[in-house]
Image (cartoon, helix red, strand yellow):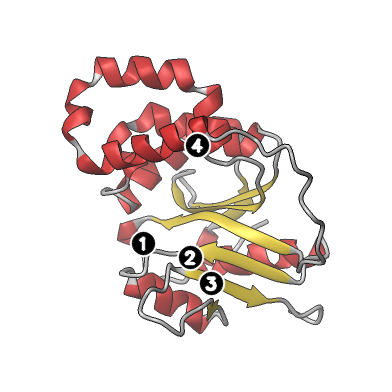
């Protein structure tokens, strides 16, 4: 579909993933995935798009087909662990080919998390099923830093919220870094609520209850 100012909103395709990776690096220059490089990033988003998930990936493009913003949302099954498992050999090769990454603390912290994921053994006990609110997760959202403040993020979030409602979800959820005050304010202006915010140890979890009368 087409939005205001000749911007086009459409689903992200596999061929768009290099643009997704490049935009992620511009928007989150200090993240571990950005530090790893464009190809690991492309593979990460390819897993989210093509893996065993219910993924809704939306992007906003201009007339030149440049990607100005994107969001990967839905219900994910092993968004990180599945990516690491599928790309294990590639990531080992990539680290050996880029040895300077070993000196990057952000990357090494993520590697430790990855190792912990691989070490975990699945529990033999069957979990007790409890009634839970169906929640539609926002895994990643980014807007080109040079195009922020133009309403692109709001258009993306409205599209994601409508998709969640059409699929029958009653709640959305996301995690934001507690120090990212600009993003937190953006979400709160859209009706998002901090979860377990009573103490000083808020972890960045936010939810948004959905109304079936939205829009």
Q: Nearer the viewer, residue 93 or 15?
A: 93
- Residue under pointer 2: 152
Find out whether the residues at labels 3 and 2 contact each other: C-beta distance under 8 Å. Answer: no
- Marks 3/2: CA–CA distance: 20 Å
- Residue under pointer 4: 117
Which of discs 2 and 4 lies nearer the camera? The answer is: 4
Q: Nearer the viewer, residue 107 or 72?
A: 107
Q: Quadrant of the N terminus?
A: bottom right
Crowding around mark 4 (Cα neighbors within 10 Å: few <14, some 14 to 19, many 20+) is some
Residue 16 visible from this viewpoint:
no
- Marks 1/4: CA–CA distance: 36 Å
Residue 111 visible from this viewpoint:
yes
Q: Closer to the N terminus: mark 3 or mark 2?
A: 2
Find out whether the residues at labels 2 and 1 contact each other: C-beta distance under 8 Å. Answer: yes
- Residue under pointer 1: 147
In this rendering, would 16 be left or right of 134?
Answer: left
Label 3 element class: strand
* Residue at screen point 80% across, 63% down: 130
In this rendering, would 77 be left or right of 30?
Answer: right
Is 123 rendered above or below residue 99? below
- Marks 2/1: CA–CA distance: 8 Å
């Amino acid at each position: 579909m087409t939005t205001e100012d000749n911007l086009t909103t459409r689903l992200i395709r596999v061929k768009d993933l290099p643009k997704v990776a490049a935009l992620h690096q511009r928007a989150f220059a200090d993240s571990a995935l950005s530090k790893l490089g464009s190809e690991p990033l492309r593979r990460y988003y390819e897993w989210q798009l093509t893996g065993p998930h219910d993924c809704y990936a939306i992007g906003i493009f201009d007339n030149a087909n440049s990607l100005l913003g994107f969001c990967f949302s839905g219900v994910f099954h092993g968004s990180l662990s599945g990516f690491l498992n599928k790309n294990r050999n590639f990531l080992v090769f990539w680290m050996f080919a880029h040895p300077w990454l070993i000196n990057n603390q952000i990357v090494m912290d993520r590697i430790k998390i990855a190792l912990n994921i691989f070490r975990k053994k699945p529990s033999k006990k069957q979990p007790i099923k409890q009634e839970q609110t169906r929640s539609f997760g926002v895994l990643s959202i980014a807007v080109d830093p040079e195009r922020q403040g133009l309403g692109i993020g709001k258009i993306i979030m409205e599209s994601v919220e409508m998709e969640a409602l059409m699929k029958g979800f009653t709640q959305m959820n996301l995690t934001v870094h507690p120090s990212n005050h600009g993003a937190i304010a953006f979400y709160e202006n859209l009706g998002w609520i901090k979860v377990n915010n009573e103490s000083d140890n808020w972890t960045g979890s936010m939810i948004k209850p959905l109304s079936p009368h939205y829009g």
